[in-house]
Amino acid sequence: MNILDERIKPDSEKYIQNLIINRRDVQEHIIERLDLEYDKSIKFTKGLSYDNKMLPDIKILRKNEILALIECKGPKINVTDYVRGIGQLFQYEHFFENNITENKTDKYSPDFKTIYLYPDEVTYKINIKNFKYPKTTILLPINLQNFSLSEFSVEQRKKFSTVGEGLIGISKYYFRDNRMFELYALIKYLKSNFSNSNKQLSRTYLENNLMQKIKVINNGNWRNAFISLSIMNIINKKNNLNKFGEKISQLNYYEFCSMVFYDYIRPYIEEIFPILIKNNNIGLSELIMQIKKKYDGKDVLFLTQAGRRYASSWLNIFRDDFGFIDFAPRRTNRIINYNPLDISKDQLEKNIIKYTKANSYLKIINTL
């Protein structure tokens, strides 16, 4: 980042604002979420004084047309701050509805949006479903590991609706009944067969007709793979790779796994693996109970829910993709090959190469 002040703390609102102003990749992610094409006429600037001296954090302009006003928050936000931000968004919508601008040359796009942008972790620190938002508002959590953004849709909000009550959130990312090499296979298939990201693809058709031909473990469960890649901001609303997905498609499988580890799934591993270190032969029910005990008996989203199904998926990923552990199907006598939480990125990738069980599937994937 060229002009980002390194003295600004990454957990501050100012840091998020500077990311948007200074990083083109972040800007491209935002523009894509507005269903627009990024071009040089689009500018991201600090908002100036509007009515009642209100200052939007960021204004997005295309020439003199206001595409969106952005309200930013940092990860340390509390409920009061969050609600205050919603109040700001309502005022931005009021400016749009009444054509109130900061100068005489600006005008609003008919498709004007207000954007609430904050780090991923806010989505599970605060039950953000139980608030009223302006009709123009898009919620855009940002992944501070790779700076990608994915819209927090109404459907996703439903999954988080009881967070803080009977449910604990540690991550917004969803992985179940898939292996990482299956997500990788979908990425490579889309890259090889649909290079035009603007082409609308039928997910149902792909799932039922084309993807079934890829003989992997869960080749009847491509729906979950599409869901995971969408939440990871690798595919767009048209079910095709976005620009970030195009970049990810250039990684080899071992680099892909490493990226997923650090950018998306580490919170789950930090919950599970210390328990396996203490008792590598622990049963799934006992593993789930120990995780829930840490949270006063509450379920952990995408980890202890659905009986043993999520936990089983994670252990299969640990074995087949990363090679953290090894065990026979439906057996609990596990071997720990290495601890991923105390090694470098380079060591992680070397261990994945050494222990992964995905190589036979990669031969198929590499022909896509």
Image (spheres, helix red, strand yellow):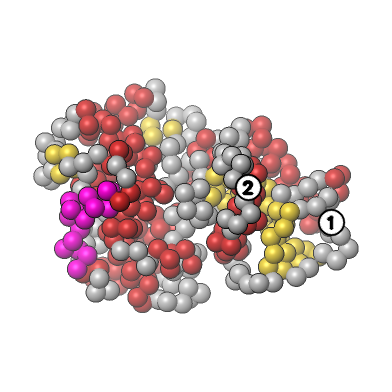
Q: Position of residue 277 (x, y in %)?
A: 22, 31
Towards the viewer: 185 or 153: 185
Q: Where is residue 226 in the image (x, y as percent from the top left)?
A: 38, 60
Quadrant of residue 363 within the rendered picture:
bottom left
Tell me how far mark 2 sits from mark 1, CA to CA.
27 Å
Question: Dot 2, how many residues are within 10 Å of its Cα: few (below 14), some (14-19), or many (20+)?
Answer: few
* Badge count: 2
Which residue sits at x=61%, y=35%? 77
Q: Which of marks 2 and 1 is nearer the N terminus?
A: 2
Q: Where is residue 249 in the image (x, y as percent from the top left)?
A: 37, 66
Residue position for label 2: 5
Horizontal arrangement in the rendering, residue 24 relative to residue 110 (left or right): left
Towards the viewer: 214 or 360: 360
Furthest residue to the right? Answer: 104
Quarter of the image where the C terminus is located: bottom left
Q: Where is residue 240 in the image (x, y as percent from the top left)?
A: 44, 69
Residue position for label 1: 102
Quadrant of residue 336 within the rendered picture:
top left
Task: Give the residues drawn in magenta, as a range.
Answer: 347-363
Horizontal arrangement in the rendering, residue 18 relative to residue 293 (left or right): right
Question: Dot 1, how many residues are within 10 Å of its Cα: few (below 14), some (14-19), or many (20+)?
Answer: some
User: Callout 2: helix, strand or loop?
Assistant: loop
Labelled pair 2, 1 in contact (Cβ < 8 Å) = no
Which residue sits at x=46%, y=77%? 196
Taking 117 as reference, is 31 above or below it?
below
Amino acid under disc 1: Glu
Specify whether residue 246 is in view: yes
Judge depth for marks 2 and 1 and give the one in front: 2
